[in-house]
Image (spheres, grey):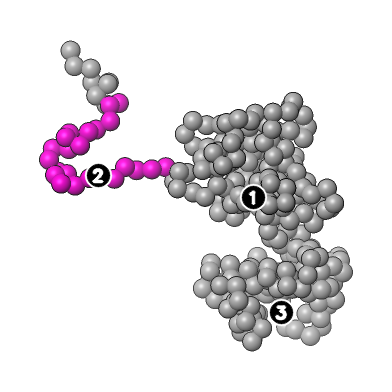
Amino acid sequence: MMDTQNMLERPIRVNETNGLLKNLKALKRLSHFCLDEPSVTIRKNSFYLSSSSIEPMQLRSYKRCYLAIEESVPLQEASKLFLVPNNNPSSDENCTIKISRRTGAAIAATTTIVSQIPILKSLMGAHKKKRRFFLKKDETYQKWYIDLMPNFEYFKKDIKQVPSVEGIYMLKYKGQTHYIGESNCLARRLKEHSREDMIPFDTIKYSVIKKSEDDRKYWEAYHINEYVRDNGELPPYNAVSAKVKKLLDENK
């Protein structure tokens, strides 16, 4: 009797295509995981690592992974999150690595770690592409890390509650973004908006950036570009001034 089950599971050979591919070669579908740069996607209870990260990180040689920041940097100001695979005993700091045969790997039980990092916590309800980070190799530490991108992770309803810090900010009204900006003193700048501008807003979202004016301007331009990419135009109250045009041109 013919084994129909084996026939269904057996891969189709070129000579089984009924002559449709004479002098042609069919292309095989590949998982998109195989085509990616090494990356990490933040999920509800784990960090998913693409299959393309397994070999560079030598994950098959390890059972656990530390998630770490630089010791000298406060958690709220960390710009890098390091992934350090290891075989040390399991602990509250050392998460288990689970490797899939087909789709990649996962660093398990990360919920409470994510909740400590405002930037990552703010992304949990976002689309997958916003929660995806490409892995990089730090030349100083010789360890893999992801950039913690300022993402307007803090928000207030009352401008009096916004601290006098350096950073970038977004003004929203009824859920719609009206303006994106940067300042070396957010509290002062927001008071100026309230007194001098006619920008309606009921929510202020912001990120603290203490590095330099260039960093603030870079991330301001980045988020303006992201808004334009998603909406086809500038936020309504971002006037197309020489400043904005210059920022957009420099960061295309």
Q: Residue at x 24, y 24 (%)?
A: 7
Going by the numbered disc 1, the residue's amino acid type is Lys
Q: Residue at x 58, y 78 (%)?
A: 249
Magenta stretch, main secondary structure, is loop
The magenta segment is 9-31
Q: Quadrant of residue 170?
A: bottom right
Q: Is residue 86 left or right of residue 34?
A: right
Q: Is residue 75 left or right of residue 223?
A: right
Whole-Å distance between the Cαs marked 3 and 1? 42 Å
Q: Is residue 199 left or right of residue 19?
A: right
**Nearer the observer, disc 3 or disc 1?**
1
Whole-Å distance between the Cαs marked 3 and 2? 57 Å
**Nearer the observer, disc 3 or disc 2?**
2
Residue that mark 1 sits on: 137
Give percent across and percent down for residue 78.
77, 54
Secondary structure, mark 3, is loop
Give percent across and percent down for residue 123.
66, 52
Residue closer to the observer: 245 or 228: 245
The tag earlier along the polypeptide, 3 or 2, is 2
The disc placed on residue 26 is 2
Q: Residues within 10 Å of mark 3 (few under 14, many from 20)?
A: some
Residue closer to the observer: 237 or 12: 12
Q: Residue at x 38, y 43 (%)?
A: 30
Q: Judge whether 143 appears above or below 198 on screen.
A: above
Q: Is residue 17 magenta?
A: yes
Secondary structure, mark 1, is strand
The disc placed on residue 199 is 3
Q: Residue at x 74, y 33 (%)?
A: 94
Give percent across and percent down for residue 152.
71, 62
